[in-house]
Amino acid sequence: MRTRSFIFCLGLLLVAASYATAQGPELEKATSFGGSSIRLPKGWLVKASSDTSLTARAPAADKESADPSGKPPQGVAEYAPAVSIKVQGYAGEIDPAAQQKVLVAGIDGYRSVETPAPVTIGEAKGYMFGGTFLFGKLQLRSRHYLLTMNNKLYVIAFTTLASRWQDHQEEFEASAKSFVPGK
């Protein structure tokens, strides 16, 4: 009888754990701007919004050594994970490799860590890619989604400390999948 009870309890725990895992990260209700919407990670705050853009940040900053070279830290630097969304008129095809090269040329220390890959979010189609770069003495990592729909280009960029990417990747991906472009 004890064995059956133990197995039953273990089964309940496994079901509960798989349900929690299947649910994914908690997201806020949809935040709308200019006809588009996105569900931000739980607790995130909108910092700026217009018909063509949205910027939001996590409520608290992540911390890391200010020196990414491995030298003993001279202090602790902070960076709050963020998302930036820009919308602009666009007709044509996206060349994601060329867009990533623009970042390599224009951002100090930008290095590709994710090559462009096709992505579909709702009815919008496009590409995603990622990279790391320096922001002052901080090593940051970003992922860009370039999506087109209804003659518009939607650029969604999630950014956080490179060392904390794994901590935020799942909530970034869930938030990106919740994006609904304007009509």
Image (cartoon, rainbow, N blue to C red):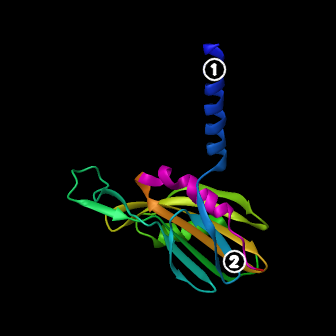
Residue type, numbered disc 2: Ser
Q: Is residue 108 above or below residue 169?
A: below
> In the image as oriented, which residue stretches furthest toward the bottom?
51
Any part of residue 98 in sight:
no
Is disc 2 placed on a helix, strand or loop? strand
Based on the picture, tell me whether residue 166 belongs to the magenta stretch: yes
Residue at the spot 68% in from the left edge and 61% down from the top edge: 177
How far across and down, in percent of the image, does residue 134 sit? 38, 64
Mark 1 — residue? 5
Residue type, numbered disc 1: Ser
How far across and down, in percent of the image, does residue 42 sit? 54, 62
Residue 77: which quarter of the image? bottom left
Residue at the spot 26% in from the left edge and 59% down from the top edge: 76
Any part of residue 44 in sight:
yes
Q: Does 104 sit left or right of 87 as displayed?
A: left
Identify which residue, 3 or 152, lies in the foreground: 3
Q: Overall secondary structure of the magenta stretch?
A: helix
Based on the picture, tell me whether residue 138 belongs to the magenta stretch: no
Q: Earlier in the sequence, mark 2 or mark 1?
A: 1
Q: Is residue 92 above or below residue 5?
A: below
Mark 2 — residue? 36
Q: Does 57 sit left or right of 136 as displayed?
A: right
Pointer 2 with pointer 1, Cβ within 8 A = no
Q: Which residues are magenta?
A: 164-182
Is disc 1 placed on a helix, strand or loop? helix
Residue at the spot 51% in from the left edge and 67% down from the top edge: 44
